[in-house]
Image: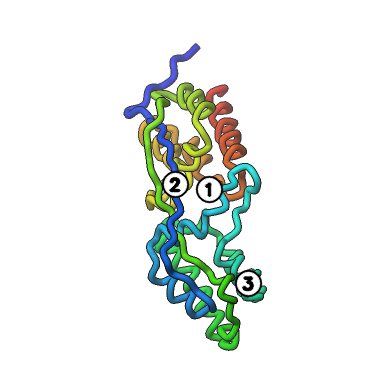
């Protein structure tokens, strides 16, 4: 059996925990929602576009967007709710660019539908802005080659999968996920790295994402 190629740098698996923190900021109509979206911290935009995925990892591969949900279900604006829900998060490599797209979508809609701003939420249905505070810690798992990487991937928690895929791609503004970055730069597995990078993680549950990545890696090992 051919010995696996050793990485230039070992891959250390990390995990994360998060806390949700109320900012004390709330909105009753679209104008207020828009102004606050422009000014809240990036961790707040992150929370409201990833909350469902973080809290219900096993239930749905398509997390709802909190802004879209509130606009549709509370303000009763189906058209704008649909426009916000259709924003494809995977296309945006930074929180800044995702925020700009949300702002642009609401501004464009209000420009052509000024009366939409006359819809107000009741006091108990206002949109409350929340930010996500993350705590990162190393696990006991590390890999120096592709086989060890696959073994570790089977063992780590879905919180670790979440950190290396979602946090790295968007919140940490790396432009790709940690797995693909390591496979490309430390193992020279460019084709394998690209296959994983091309996955749309928002269409999987976290456990399904782990299985899909493992299948891709195991196929490469078998080759």
Image location (x, y in percent) of residue 190: 44, 37
Of residues 2 and 47, the one nearer the viewer is 47
Give the answer, above or below, for where 161 lies relative to 52: above
Residue beneath disc 2? 18
Image location (x, y in percent) of residue 204: 61, 45
Of residues 1 and 210, the one nearer the viewer is 210
Q: How many residues crowd mark 1 within 10 Å: few (<14), some (14–19), many (20+)?
A: some
Give the distance between the C-alpha atoms of the residues marked 1 and 2, in whole angstroms. Answer: 9 Å
Q: Left or right? Give the position of 59 relative to 149.
A: right
Residue beneath disc 1? 54
The quarter of the displayed image where residue 58 is located = top right
Name the secondary structure under disc 2: strand
> Which-is-in-front pick, marks 3 and 1?
3
The number of callouts visible is 3
Image location (x, y in percent) of residue 137: 37, 36
3 or 1: tag closer to the N-terminus:
1
Q: In the picture, which quadrant includes the C terminus? A: top right
Q: Residue furthest bottom?
A: 115
Q: Which mark is residue 220?
A: none
1 or 2: tag closer to the N-terminus:
2
Give the answer, above or below, for where 110 lies relative to 102: below
Q: How many residues crowd mark 3 within 10 Å: few (<14), some (14–19), many (20+)?
A: some
Q: Left or right? Give the position of 27 relative to 215.
A: left
Residue drawn at (50%, 79%) of the image: 107
Give the answer, above or below, for where 165 lies relative to 70: above
Q: Are marks 1 and 2 in contact (CB under 8 Å)?
A: yes
Residue drawn at (53%, 46%) of the image: 198
Residue beneath disc 3? 74
Give the distance between the C-alpha atoms of the residues marked 3 and 1, in whole angstroms. Answer: 23 Å
> Which-is-in-front pick, marks 1 and 2?
2
Name the secondary structure under disc 1: helix
């Amino acid at each position: 059996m051919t010995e696996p190629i050793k990485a230039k740098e070992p891959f250390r698996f990390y995990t994360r925990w998060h806390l949700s923190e109320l900012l004390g900021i709330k909105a009753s109509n679209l104008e207020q929602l828009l102004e606050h979206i422009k000014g809240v911290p990036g961790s707040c935009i992150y929370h409201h576009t990833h909350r469902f995925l973080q809290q219900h990892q096993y239930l749905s591969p398509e997390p709802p967007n909190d802004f879209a949900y509130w606009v549709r279900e509370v303000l009763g604006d189906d058209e704008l709710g649909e426009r916000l829900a259709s924003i494809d998060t995977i296309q945006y490599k930074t929180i800044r660019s995702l925020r700009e797209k949300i702002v642009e979508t609401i501004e464009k809609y209000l420009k052509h539908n000024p009366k939409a701003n006359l819809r107000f939420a009741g006091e108990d249905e206002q949109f409350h802005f929340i930010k996500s505070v993350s705590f990162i810690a190393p696990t006991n798992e590390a890999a120096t080659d592709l086989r060890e990487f696959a073994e570790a991937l089977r063992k780590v928690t879905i919180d670790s999968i979440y950190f290396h895929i979602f946090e790295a791609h968007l919140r940490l503004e790396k432009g790709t996920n940690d797995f693909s970055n390591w496979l490309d730069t430390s193992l020279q597995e460019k084709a394998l790295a690209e296959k994983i990078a091309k996955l749309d993680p928002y269409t999987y549950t976290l456990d399904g994402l782990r299985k899909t990545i493992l299948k891709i890696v195991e196929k490469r090992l078998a080759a």
